[in-house]
């Protein structure tokens, strides 16, 4: 038999899978959103604020079986930790649902926004970014207050969870502030919004745009005291690090980890006196 026929009978070599951490490992970072970026930004705003409005309206109907007045239901929504937990739970669920219902219409939609299969290294990346974030934040606040001495850096966020008592209320407060927001906000901002902006903008512009909008969304947390600028500065810097993790890992899980760790630090600082 000739050498040519011998070569023809040899089975083809199997493709060698690239090692983890190579370009193909983060292939979904190269996928582009199929939807119009302007539509994406518009929908992100509608989903973010609309979810809160719908949640508040839905919970306000609780007054009918209780035969409450408008003031009584307002007091319940404002002062009850259970009510505030339900408000956040419903609002964050609607955010995730809204994004999911939109992107599932597009091929690779979930992968485009960073919802790939989790890896064991994702939490490690999130943990490793916590200290750099804290250092950058403290340095940035120091520089900003040097040039703007009047900036109130001690103003607190109006979180609505005041004086929790007992393990049950502490647990609901923890879920409301540490677990639920990182999941929904990462899917909406670093996932859907960032992917939408990145389609037609340079990466740097998409990063800045996403972070600015994320910061603006936290300005109202000053409540009756007015815009909470220190929270906007904090969330802007945090968003920069979160997007870096998104790009590095090709998914949102590391970003969710860092976001949850950051909120854990704030939770302990605010509610340490109530934890026994």
Image (tube, rainbow, N blue to C red):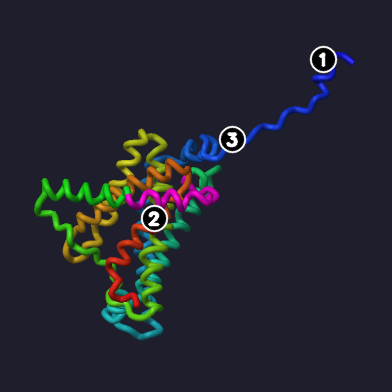
At label 1, counting other C-alpha atoms closer than 10 Å, the crowd grade (few under 14, some 14-19, many 20 or more) is few
* Sequence-wise first label, 1 or 3: 1
The secondary structure type at the circle numbered 1 is helix
Quarter of image, res 93? bottom left
Q: Nearer the viewer, residue 39 or 158?
A: 158
Q: What residue would you read off at disc 2? A: 185
| Residue to which mark 3 is pinned | 18
Q: Magenta residues?
A: 113-131
Looking at the rendered structure, which numbered label has been put on residue 276?
A: none
The residue under the point 21% across, 55% down is 230
Q: Residue at x 54, y 39 (%)?
A: 25
Q: State the CA–CA distance, disc 3 to disc 2.
A: 32 Å
Q: Nearer the viewer, residue 100 or 274?
A: 274
Separation of marks 1 and 3 at Cα, in angstroms = 31 Å
Instruction: Give the vertical position of 56 relative to 203 (above or below).
Output: below
The furthest residue to the left: 149
Check the image and report above or below for 92 versus 216.
below
Q: Is residue 58 left or right of residue 4?
A: left
Can you identify the residue that label 1 sits on?
A: 4
Asked if the residue under mark 1 is in contact with the one under mark 2, i.e. CB atoms within 8 Å, the reply is no
In the displayed structure image, the side of residue 173 where residue 104 appears, left or right: right
Please state the horizontal and vertical placement of residue 102, each as a whole percent of the image: 48, 50
SS type, badge 2: helix
Of 23 and 130, the residue lying toward us: 130
């Amino acid at each position: 038999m000739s050498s040519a026929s011998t070569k023809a009978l040899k089975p083809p070599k199997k493709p060698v899978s690239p090692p983890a951490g190579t370009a193909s490992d983060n292939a979904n970072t190269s996928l582009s959103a199929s939807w119009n970026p302007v539509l994406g930004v518009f929908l992100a705003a509608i989903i973010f604020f609309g979810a809160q409005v719908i949640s508040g309206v839905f919970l306000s109907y609780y007054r009918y079986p209780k035969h409450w007045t408008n003031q009584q239901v307002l007091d319940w929504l404002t002062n009850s930790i259970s009510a505030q937990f339900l408000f956040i739970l419903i609002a964050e669920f609607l955010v995730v649902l809204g994004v999911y219902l939109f992107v599932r219409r597009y091929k690779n939609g979930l992968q485009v926004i960073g919802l790939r299969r989790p890896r064991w290294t994702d939490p490690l990346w999130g943990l490793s970014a916590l200290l750099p974030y804290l250092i950058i934040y403290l340095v940035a606040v120091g520089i900003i207050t040097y040039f703007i001495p009047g900036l109130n850096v001690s103003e607190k966020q109006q979180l609505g969870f005041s004086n929790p008592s007992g393990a049950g209320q502490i647990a609901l407060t923890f879920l409301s502030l540490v677990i639920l927001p990182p999941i929904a906000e990462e899917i909406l901002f670093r996932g859907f919004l960032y992917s939408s902006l990145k389609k037609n903008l340079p990466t740097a512009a998409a990063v800045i745009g996403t972070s600015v909008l994320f910061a603006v969304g936290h300005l109202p947390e000053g409540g009756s005291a007015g815009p909470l600028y220190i929270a906007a500065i904090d969330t802007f810097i945090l968003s920069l690090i979160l997007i870096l993790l998104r790009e590095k890992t090709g998914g949102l899980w590391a970003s969710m980890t860092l976001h949850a760790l950051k909120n854990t630090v704030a939770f302990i600082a605010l509610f340490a006196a109530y934890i026994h």
